[in-house]
Image (cartoon, rainbow, N blue to C red):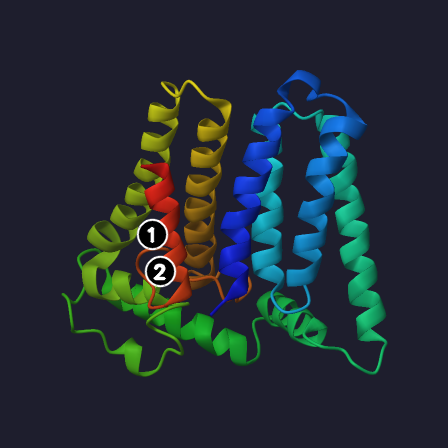
Amino acid sequence: FQTSDLAKLALIMFVARMLSRKQENIKDFKTAFLPIMLPVLIVCGLILPANLSTSLLIFFTCIVLMFIGRINMKYVIIMCGLGVVLLSGYVAVKYYSDDRGRVVTWINRVKRFTSGEGSDNYQADQAKIAIATGGLVGKFPGNSTQRNFLPHPYSDFIFAIIIEEYGFIFGGVLMIFLYLLLFFRVIRFINHSPRAFATLLAVGCSFMLVFQAMINMAVAVNLFPVTGQPLPLVSMGGTSTLFTSIALGIIL
């Protein structure tokens, strides 16, 4: 059971609820910004040591919600700057301590991504081969060969296998279009929502799913360092599938 998946949904619900309740004093630092931002920082800080990408995903989603909820952007920008400083300080302290944790993994992944060498780039190279051999129309379902060489072809790199089997047009472009269509439809129907809480909650859930999908696709085409983010509704996974379904149920 991945507790971070529960934290994603719970935190989005909390932020949406607090933003809707604080609308009268939304520009105030003490009564609106701090009560919302402190729990976000605490939860993201607890997830950070084990899963940096999930922590950043949750933090960015909450920032987008605050922007939509009319929080004073000056406070948000200051907090983002403080977050960068705290993250840099954490990485520096852990790197020079005896117990480095996953900090070394994060640094190595970034180095491998920029240099093009290492085990992570083996994954990226195999994904590129899958995408290149798929061409425009693909090899057709079930005919993938790179799934035998690509690590995690059923989760982290499922997008590359989809392009290999279904092609760039019916696999890659169609998948991106469907996720963007999902987000577009949510934006369309929230215009008719009479309540701020429902609106913010639907936007938060849909943005989280679409943003996570874009990160997964970016990793598969080597536009982003390797992360462990699954492709919502597509990648194999227990907890992820469960909470993705709950998020879609909330949106509906």
User: Mark 2: few, some, or many residues within 10 Å (few <14, many ≥20)?
Assistant: some
Q: Nearer the viewer, residue 195 or 87?
A: 195
Q: Where residue 223 appears, x then y in whole percent?
A: 50, 57
| 213 with respect to 97 (left or right) | left
Q: Is residue 180 above or below residue 113?
A: above
Q: Is residue 186 above or below residue 114?
A: above
Residue 152 visible in the displayed image: yes
What residue sits right under mark 2 in the picture?
A: 241
Q: Where residue 228 appears, x then y in whole percent?
A: 50, 67
Q: Is residue 231 above or below residue 200?
A: below
Residue 223 visible in the displayed image: no
In terms of image quadrants, where is residue 102?
A: bottom right
* Label placed on residue 245: 1
CB atoms of marks 1 and 2 within 8 Å: yes
Q: Nearer the viewer, residue 100 or 71?
A: 71
Q: Where residue 174 appears, x then y in whole percent?
A: 25, 47
Cα distance between the residues tagged 1 and 2 = 6 Å
| 175 with respect to 92 (left or right) | left
Q: What residue is shown at x 79% (from left), y 36% (from top)?
A: 78
Secondary structure beneath label 1: helix
Q: Where residue 192 appears, x then y in whole percent?
A: 36, 18
Q: Which residue type does callout 2 highlight?
A: Thr
Q: What residue is shown at x 62% (from left), y 38% (from top)?
A: 63
Secondary structure beneath label 2: helix
| 162 with respect to 31 (left or right) | left
Q: What residue is shown at x 49% (from left), y 49% (from top)?
A: 9
Position of the C terminus by quadrant: top left
Q: Nearer the viewer, residue 228 or 165?
A: 228
